[in-house]
Image (spheres, rainbow, N blue to C red):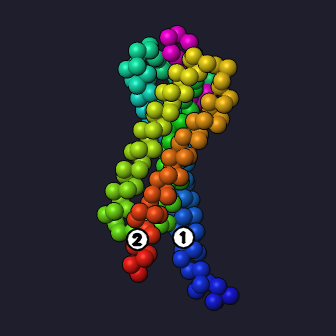
Amino acid sequence: MKALFIKYKSVIKFILTFLCVYIALSISYKFYLDFSDGSKYYPDYLTHLTAQQSELLINSLGYEAIVESHPNEPSMKLIINDKFVARVIEGCNSISVIILFVSFILAFADNFKRTTIYLLAGSVLIYSINLIRIVILSIGLYHYPWRKDILHTIIFPLIIYGLVFLLWMLWVRRFTISRLRNV
C-alpha cells in the first residue's frame, strides 16, 4: 500500500488539494449567500451586479432592458422591450464555475506569481464571458423563445464549461507540463 502512495503521490496530492480548495471555497460561498443582506442588493450582491451589468450590455446593443427584483423568488427579472425573457438567479453569477476553475488551478499550482496572475485573469475572463452568455441568451430568448431548452440547457452551458476546460488545458500544457519536464 505504501508503494502505491509513493508511486501516485502527485495524483493523490492533486485530488486532495482540489477537494480541499473546492470544499473550502464552496462552504465560504454558502456562508456568503446565507449571510448576505438581501435588503440592499437582492437576492445577493454578486447576482444583483451580474443582472445590472447584463442590463447595461443589452441596452448598449440597442434594446431596452430592465432588471427588477422578482417578487416571488430570489432572482432578478430580466425584461427586454417590455417582454419578460429570463430570471437571473444565483447560479447565473458564475461564482460556482469560478470556484471550480480556481480549485483545479490551485491543485496544479506553479509559482505564486504565475498562479495568482492566471487565477485573476481566468476568473475575470470567465465572469466576462458569462455576462456575454447571459446577454446572448436573453436576446435569443427574446427573439426565439421556442428555442429556450436548447439555448439554456445545451449551448450556453457548453460555452461556459468549454471555456473553463480550455483554460485548464492551457494551464496544464503551457505552464505546468513545462515545469514538470524541468524537474
Q: Is residue 113 visible?
A: yes
Q: Measured from the top left, where is residue 18 in percent x and y? A: 54, 64
Question: How many other residues sit within 10 Å of disc 2, few (<14), some (14-19) or many (≥20)?
Answer: few
User: Which SS class for mark 2?
Assistant: helix
Q: Nearer the viewer, residue 132 or 22?
A: 132
The residue positioned 49% from the left and 58% from the top of the image is 169
Q: Quick check: 34 left or right of 170?
A: right
Query: Within the image, what quadrant is residue 9 found in?
Result: bottom right
Residue beneath disc 1 = 14
The residue positioned 46% from the left and 17% from the top of the image is 66
On screen, residue 22 above or below 86: below
Spatial CA distance of label 1 from label 2 is 17 Å
Q: Measured from the top left, where is residue 30 in percent x and y? A: 55, 48
Q: Which mark is residue 178?
A: 2
User: Which SS class for mark 1?
Assistant: helix
On screen, residue 23 above or below 78: below
The magenta stretch is 73-83
On screen, residue 126 above or below 15: above
The residue positioned 37% from the left and 56% from the top of the image is 118
Rendered-image quadrant of the C terminus? bottom left
Q: Earlier in the sequence, mark 1 or mark 2?
A: 1
The residue positioned 44% from the left and 41% from the top of the image is 127
Q: Any magenta on residue 82?
A: yes
On screen, residue 23 above or below 153: below
Q: Is residue 40 visible?
A: no
